[in-house]
Image (cartoon, coloured by chain):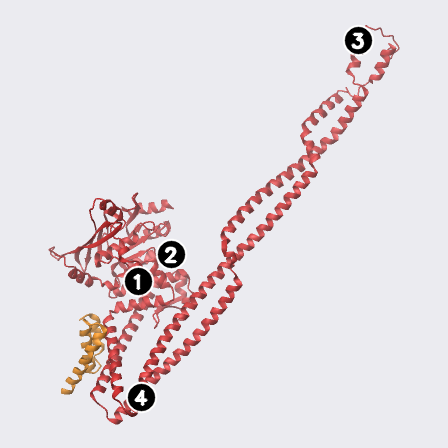
């Protein structure tokens, strides 16, 4: 099947008519549909499944009631329902299959009544064109369904969607995984009828053996009774093995859970150590700050002097200037001038006349000269200020140093507080988790696992012994019947039914074994295509075990699944789903079906992502990559563009009313858009 | 007859005729009957196959 276009009208998030076109260009077969979560990426695969099969639910909707799953666009529904008008939701698919052209249109009507959405089918129409371009139309749902089933068996449809859930499910070694693979093989083989026939034959066998036992006598009756008991015991032991396997798996999961918690505690332990160190640092900072404050307090007197530094400097400079001008100390002391004035006689002995010019000059001189006490005081002040000036510098230096240190300590303290707050958030309530208790619990689980494994081995041995016993009893019974020449009609009936049952069982086992081998081989090829060089050197193959679990073998052919990384497991899942899709397409090399991959990059490394975008386009005719902004970034977009297989790019835009608009761009614009988003 | 049934019958070629007949009848009946009803119907089929073999 090659899709040419898919048209959605009021389907899910898509309001009004919207279309995605798929150009039939052989070498450009990748369509990227890009949108944030909830914008309707899976809705496009859902639309395809609805159109082909009328199915509303996907396998991922297992837990959702069909009545709760709305396919009709809710925005349109609300608007139209207020006017009492039902909304038609339809999907139209144009596709080619084996060179024949098909147009399939399926719709349903929806209406909102008393707050409840009511949806009902509104028919299906299939138009086919023959080689000469003549068309015919079919509207009978049963006939349309037969056409579609012949193109792609509905039971196999889900192998063409790789969603995160399915990828995750297959990466886990669990009952769920085994069930998934077992179901897949059964679906691929289409052996439902074979199993039904086997079940009916088993019933018939039991019934006929009971009848035969009723009629038997002597040793033959005894052997038949033993056979019945042996069968019952085998049944019981088989159930026992299954239940022990379940217990074992549960215990292993529990151990993984405890290991995760312990790991978390180890992580928390690191955080706690970090927190203790920070708290110690915070306390040291506080002490250092107090020391500085104490020192500053002790130096308050000295430091206060800094307040007077400018005044002191001015006074010192003023005195010093006067000193430099020899004004102080004065050449003649004031008390000598006073004596001269009292005696009215100059030093040279001349008489000084009051009111004379000489007298006036002496008075002026006297006034200029401070008294002795003032002069002494001034000189003492000069000396004191001179020595204080030297200390100002060291006081200032000390004060600046203390304040700078205090400031940086305060900043560091703030940073420590912030870091502590962040750590508190990280540590949260898990701090209380008790590692010792968990360690003890883990040990108990390990012991339990050991016990279950032992019990399982013993039960399997008993089961083998019972099978041996079964064979011996059958041989013994045959010998008795041969010796006694018993060939009655009921015995022959039992023989025929038992032989037929054994033949059917052998065929069933052969088919499933062939399928397991074939799936393993295909998965290995895809796996090798996707792995990085180093992994390719270390890992050899994927195989499906007898119990349907997937195993990876290393280059020495030893089971290696437990040791591979999460990314390698994801690659393994993708390879396996691709192998299932290939089997669903009848084993052809190029899958003639579109492969939908919903956000497949998850835990993949750059190398694996690169391989994925390089290889998948060669696996199928169309690869529809549904990608979120977190998964499909510049790296992936550039790698895909470099392959030359990228055909078109669709962006799912959110509209104001909550619906989604499909916007087509060229690959170049798409690449630019992705790079711009960074 | 579906592909799988043809494959099953091919695998039965080396088995005795009555087993092939039984499986063929079982598949024919299984197309319309559930398992329990099929087991009931097969009781009569087994008788029929053995009777035909006896006549031969």
What chain letter is assigned to the residue under label 3?
A: A
Cα distance, mark 2 to mark 1?
17 Å
Name the N-terminal-most of marks 1 and 4: 4
The label on residue A611 is none
The label on residue A578 is 1
- The color chain A is rendered in: red
Q: Nearer the viewer, mark 4 or mark 2?
A: 4
Q: Secondary structure at mark 1?
A: helix
Residue furthest front in the image: A114
Q: Quadrant of residue A136?
A: bottom left
Q: Which residue bears the numbered disc 4?
A: A223
Q: Secondary structure at mark 4?
A: helix
Q: Which residue bears the numbered disc 3?
A: A360
Q: Quadrant of residue B20?
A: bottom left
**Is circle 4 on the same chain as circle 2?**
yes
**Circle 4 Cα neighbour tier, 10 Å, few/some/many (<14 / 14–19 / ≥20):** some
Cα distance, mark 1 to mark 3?
126 Å
Cα distance, mark 4 to mark 2?
60 Å
What chain letter is assigned to the residue under label 2?
A: A
In the image, taking residue A375 as reference, residue B8 lies left or right, namely left
What chain letter is assigned to the residue under label 4?
A: A
Q: Position of residue A550 (x, y in %)?
A: 36, 68
Name the N-terminal-most of marks 4 and 3: 4
**Circle 2 Cα neighbour tier, 10 Å, few/some/many (<14 / 14–19 / ≥20):** some
Viewer-closest of A282 and A348: A282
Q: Secondary structure at mark 3?
A: helix
Q: Looking at the image, how many numbered discs can be counted on the residues?
A: 4
- The color chain B is rendered in: orange
Contact, mark 2 vs mark 3 (Cβ under 8 Å): no
**Circle 1 Cα neighbour tier, 10 Å, few/some/many (<14 / 14–19 / ≥20):** many
The label on residue A602 is 2
């Amino acid at each position: 099947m090659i899709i040419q276009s898919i048209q959605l009208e009021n389907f899910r998030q898509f309001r009004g008519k919207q279309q995605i076109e798929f150009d039939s260009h052989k070498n450009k077969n990748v369509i990227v549909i890009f949108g944030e979560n909830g914008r309707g990426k899976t809705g496009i695969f859902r639309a395809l499944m609805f159109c082909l099969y009328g199915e509303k639910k996907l396998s991922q909707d297992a837990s959702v009631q069909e009545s709760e799953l709305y396919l009709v666009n809710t925005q349109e529904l609300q608007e139209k329902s207020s006017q009492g008008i039902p909304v038609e939701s339809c999907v139209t698919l144009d596709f080619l299959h084996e060179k024949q052209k098909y147009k399939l249109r399926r719709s349903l009507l929806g209406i909102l009544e008393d707050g409840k959405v009511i949806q009902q089918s509104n028919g299906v129409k299939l138009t086919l064109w023959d080689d000469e371009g003549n068309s015919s139309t079919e509207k009978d749902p049963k006939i349309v369904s037969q056409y579609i089933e012949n193109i792609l068996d509905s039971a196999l449809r889900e192998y063409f969607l790789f969603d995160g859930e399915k990828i995750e499910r297959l990466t886990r070694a669990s009952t769920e995984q085994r069930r998934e693979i077992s179901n897949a093989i059964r679906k691929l083989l289409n052996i439902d009828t074979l199993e039904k026939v086997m079940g009916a034959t088993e019933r018939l066998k039991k019934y006929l053996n009971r009848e035969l036992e009723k009629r038997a006598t002597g040793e033959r009756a005894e052997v038949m009774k033993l056979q019945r008991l042996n069968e019952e015991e085998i049944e019981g032991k088989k159930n026992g093995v299954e239940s022990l396997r379940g217990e074992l798996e549960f215990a292993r999961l529990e151990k993984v859970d405890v290991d995760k918690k312990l790991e978390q505690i180890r992580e928390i332990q690191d955080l706690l150590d970090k927190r203790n160190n920070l708290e110690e640092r915070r306390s040291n900072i506080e002490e250092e700050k107090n020391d500085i404050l104490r020192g500053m307090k002790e130096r308050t007197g000295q430091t206060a002097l800094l307040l007077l530094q400018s005044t002191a400097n001015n006074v010192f400079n003023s005195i010093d200037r006067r000193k430099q001008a020899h004004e102080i100390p004065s050449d003649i002391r004031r008390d000598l001038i006073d004596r001269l004035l009292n005696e009215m006689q100059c030093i040279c002995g001349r008489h000084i006349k009051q009111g004379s010019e000489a007298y006036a000059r002496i008075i002026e001189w006297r006034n200029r000269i401070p008294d002795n006490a003032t002069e002494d005081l001034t000189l003492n002040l000069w000396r004191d200020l001179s020595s204080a000036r030297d200390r100002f510098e060291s006081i200032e230096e000390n004060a600046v140093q203390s304040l700078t240190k205090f400031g940086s300590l305060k900043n560091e303290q703030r940073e420590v507080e912030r870091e502590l707050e962040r750590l508190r958030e990280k540590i949260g309530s898990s701090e209380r988790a008790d590692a010792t208790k968990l360690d003890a619990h883990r040990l108990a689980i390990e012991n339990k696992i050991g016990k279950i494994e032992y019990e399982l081995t013993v039960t399997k041995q008993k089961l083998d012994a019972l099978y041996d016993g079964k064979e011996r009893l059958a041989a013994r019974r045959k010998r008795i019947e041969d010796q006694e020449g018993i060939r009655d009609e009921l015995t022959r009936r039992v023989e025929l039914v038992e032989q037929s049952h054994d033949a059917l069982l052998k065929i069933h086992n052969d088919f499933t074994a062939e399928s397991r081998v074939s799936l393993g081989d295909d998965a290995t090829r895809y796996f090798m295509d996707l792995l990085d060089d180093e992994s390719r050197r270390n890992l050899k193959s994927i195989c499906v075990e007898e119990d349907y679990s997937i195993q990876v073998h290393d280059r020495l052919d030893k089971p290696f699944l437990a040791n591979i990384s999460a990314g390698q497991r994801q690659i393994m899942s993708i390879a396996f789903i691709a192998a299932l899709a290939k089997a669903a397409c009848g084993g052809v090399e190029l899958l003639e079906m579109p492969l939908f991959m919903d956000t497949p990059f998850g835990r993949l490394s750059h190398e694996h992502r690169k391989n994925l975008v390089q290889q998948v386009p060669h696996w199928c005719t169309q690869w529809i990559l549904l990608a979120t902004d977190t998964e499909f970034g510049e790296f992936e977009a550039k790698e895909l563009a470099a392959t030359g297989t990228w055909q078109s790019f669709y962006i799912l835009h959110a509209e104001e009313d909550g619906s989604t608009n499909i916007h087509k761009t060229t690959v170049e614009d798409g690449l630019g858009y992705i790079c711009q988003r960074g | 007859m579906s592909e799988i049934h043809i494959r099953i019958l091919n695998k039965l070629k080396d088995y005795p005729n009555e087993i092939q007949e039984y499986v063929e009848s079982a598949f024919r009946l299984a197309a319309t009957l559930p398992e329990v009803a099929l087991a009931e119907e097969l009781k009569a089929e087994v008788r029929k196959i053995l009777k035909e073999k006896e006549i031969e």
